[in-house]
Amino acid sequence: MKTKITLLILISAATVSLAQLPDLYSIAAFNITAHDYPERANFVIKNQKTFTESDTLLEISAPPAFIKPGRVVMRKKYGADYRLYMGELDTAAFSAYPPLYAFDLPKWSRSGQAMWYRFFTKRTDNRNLDIETVFFDNERIYVQHHGKLFYSRNDEWDSIAGATGAPYGELRLDSEPPGADIYIYGKATGKRTPADFRGIIAGRYEVELFLPEYRFQRRDIAVPARGAAASSFQLMSDFDTLYVLGEAQHGVLVLPYPPIDSAYRIGDSVTYAHQEQRLTLLGGEYRITWNGGGLYKDIDTTVTVSAGLMTYFSAPFVRLAGSAVFELYPQDALLCIEGFPCVTGGIEVDLYSGFYSARITRYGYEPERRKFVISHGKKYLIRVTLDETADRDYDGFPDSIDKCPDDYGLYDGCPKPGFKHAAKMKLEEITEYMETEPLSFAVSAIGIISRIPTNRRFRTFLSGFSGGSTGGLNNYNGITLGNAYQVSYRGFMAQAELGQWVSGVKFRRPNDTLYYPKNNPSYKIWYDSLYNVDPAIFFPSTALSVGFKYRLWNYSVGYSLGYQWEDIIIDQIEDMNDGNLTRVVFDNDWWFHELMIEADLFIDTFASPSLYAKFKLPFGPTRRTKWHSLQLGLQLRVRPVNWKNKV
């Protein structure tokens, strides 16, 4: 009997233990090493201490219950271990390469629950093939390279889709009465109501308003991604008699929380305002000083505290500034300074005093993060020379081809891929592009076109018309305006092109006469300005094509197969049978291959100009002549998805 009871207890314990096992695709525990992580090893997360030169990220032991907007937790995989590091989100990563995608947390995730799950690029039976580096904040997941993530939960696979572009939002604050100082998470913003905060990371913000002689108010406000939140405060007056201690009447001095951790000095007393401080003082005049630490202008002023009243210390905190000049080698490297848009090449920029970090990148070179300090009234010269990218995993194969070590890591090196493996990786890259490329529309603005007929006899005939020189608005040799249209989505594209004319190819050879056809002429071509006889050739046409397109960084290449409906019109020529001037129309339709190259000047805006070059290579039968065609110009591309990302 005792044996049976013991056996039942063991079975029950095993059953309970089995029921408590985590999901096979989740993470059982995070490894704690107490080792800092160098932030230069990535360009998504940076040190969260604004006023320090530290370049390391602090390791944390578990997912935090709450993450302030703008901060992120990096989950890093080392072999079979996982570690967590806390830092600030470097928003410059959204405008650089490789692309950074933002994913909304699954609806079931609360307070960092998603950090316990592994994320994959596709469904797989091998749970060790999860993405090595994943970033989390309170509402989103961030991953480089991949626009779609897969995860398994409760033995069921699911996926989430990401979007490029920073999850910015907008916060509008107002108060009655206006003019209240605005503090966010206890720090002064330097703004007063009414005020707008644009380009802030979406999330939940703790907002406080302070106005002399009014009670302060605090609210939690949720700012949506790619949207706006507004809140209006009704401030209550605090202009009342306070209290009397003994026989002397006192007043209250309210000291706001300063922007940096620096103490107030009231006379000979030192007061640290870690939050709003209310000091009970005898009525009278007091000297207050505050050291700005080289970041803000020092304050030295007097305040009168009135007996029985509340007095607010409202001296402004004025930020000091300097400047920095960047010299970059190579000169076309991309420079991203925190808080500023990325620019190509060196730049001189005015900055507030303090510590900053800048990221310098260029394809084919090792990226570099440079920390620097700005002091008031000084100009600093910062030279950065990038090193050419090496084969970091020493496998003898370029890192850009075998994706090592970025995708596979440096552990035990990466296998040298053969032709099939390299082709498979490129196919996966193209497949992911076709799954994530957004819808876009393009229309040509202005361009030039040059066409050469393949039929030698027709080319000789055409050269008789002013030597083939035309200019003006036409689709032979001249200018084009708004005549080409393109729609692209998921790697496919469709194009339409309309022929344009202001004037044709003019004959205008007063002392010459041309016969057509040459051997058995039916028409005579001659020019006479006195009788307004001005022969010309027109090539009205419409072309449609469909094909494929692939974009890498700001550049796109494409191929399309098309058909061109075209007429050749010879106007004001003499019919030799009756001597009348007439117009002759020849049908001249033809097939073509088209190769296209585009260069977008911007890729993260709603409307972006881009340069294009198109080459038409004709094939198949035609009645008169086929054409070799070259087009160069400027077009405007619109991506509707980026309209949603505007702030």
Image (tube, rainbow, N blue to C red):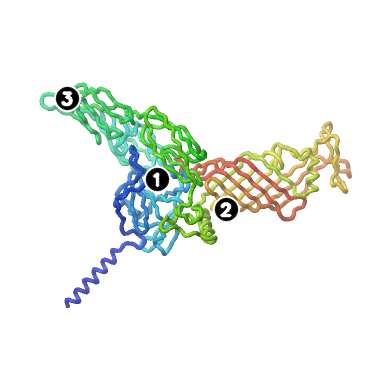
Q: Could you tell whether 131 is left or right of 458 in the image?
A: left
Q: Of callouts 2 and 1, which one flags the residue occurring earlier in the amino acid sequence?
A: 1
Q: Could you tell whether 95 is left or right of 186 in the image?
A: right
- The one nearer the camera, 383 or 239, is 383
- What is the spatial separation of the Cα atoms under label 3 and label 1, in whole angstroms? 54 Å
Q: Are marks 3 and 2 in contact (CB under 8 Å)?
A: no
- Name the kind of residue labelled 2 in the image: Phe
Q: Could you tell whether 28 is left or right of 567 in the image?
A: left
Residue 314 horizontal/vertical position (percent): 29, 27
* Residue under numbered circle 2: 492
Neighbour tally class for label 1: few under 14, some 14-19, many 20 plus, Cα within 10 Å: some
Residue 468 horizontal/vertical position (percent): 76, 40
Q: Of callouts 3 and 2, which one flags the residue occurring earlier in the amino acid sequence?
A: 3
Disc 2 secondary structure class = strand
- The one nearer the camera, 151 or 134, is 134
Q: Could you tell whether 432 is left or right of 519 in the image?
A: left
- Name the kind of residue labelled 3 in the image: Leu
Disc 3 secondary structure class = strand
> Quick check: can you spot residue 238?
no
Q: Of callouts 3 and 1, which one flags the residue occurring earlier in the amino acid sequence?
A: 1
Can you tell which mark lies on residue 40?
Answer: 1
At 80% from the left and 45% from the top, the residue drawn is: 460
- Name the kind of residue labelled 1 in the image: Arg
Check the picture and name the quadrant holding the N terminus.
bottom left
Which quarter of the picture shows residue 211?
top left
Disc 1 secondary structure class = helix
At 52% from the left and 45% from the top, the residue drawn is: 639
Can you tell which mark lies on residue 282?
Answer: 3
